[in-house]
Amino acid sequence: MQFSQFDSILTQSLPSLEPGFGFTPWVSTNPSPIENKTQTHSFSGSDGPARPGLSPVDDRRLRRKISNRESARRSRMRKQRHLEDLRILASRLRSENRELASRLGAVTHNCFLFRRESERLRTEATSLCLRLSEIRRFLLSRQLQRLSSPAAALMCGGGGGFVPGSAQTGSSIIA
């Protein structure tokens, strides 16, 4: 096939594609494909053999129509696969979202429990610090009392004697 034949096909005027002019790409402009049986060459290229009884233009139009249908079918299948992939992904993400929300709820609950326990321990630590401070003051005052009155300590029976009023106060502070 020569390039001049392609040029003649490409330079032919095509019918208007505007609506209302009666042209649809899948309908042949020739009244009958049988009228053009005299032409024997085909523009089928590597797509397959020429279809008998069709003009090269009709044959090309028919191949283009078949190719477009096949392309549209493949496109629909790709779109369907893509849509199914998106549905699977959405389902997986919803499931993951539920799992993360559940874990977040558990972590939030544990955080609340730890904060409550921390506050309780702080209060207890403050209370214990106050008691320790009172005990230290008591022991310091007791030592000062012993050191300031050595005669009182001797009267009670020696250096580490017993002071009747202070023992009870010490036990009430310690307990």
Image (cartoon, rainbow, N blue to C red):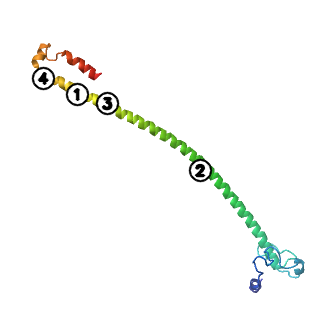
The residue wearing badge 2 is 93
In the rendered view, does 168 fall on the left or right side of 31? left
- The amino acid type, in three-letter code, at marker 4 is Leu
**Measured Cα–Cα span from mark 4 to mark 1:** 16 Å
Q: Quadrant of residue 58 in the image?
A: bottom right
In the rendered view, does 96 fall on the left or right side of 38? left
- Residue at the far left in the pictured view: 151
In the rendered view, does 158 fall on the left or right side of 22? left
- Residue 63 drawn above or below residue 74: below
Residue at 27% across, 23% down: 173
**Measured Cα–Cα span from mark 3 to mark 2:** 50 Å
**Measured Cα–Cα span from mark 4 to mark 3:** 30 Å
Quadrant of the image for the N terminus?
Answer: bottom right
Q: Specify few, some or many for label 1: CA neighbours under 10 Å numbering under 14, 14-19, or 20 or more.
A: few
Please state the total of marks drawn on the protein image: 4
User: Residue 89: image x %, image y %?
Assistant: 62, 52
- The amino acid type, in three-letter code, at marker 3 is Ser
Foreground tag (3 vs 2) = 3
- Residue 142 drawn above or below residue 12: above
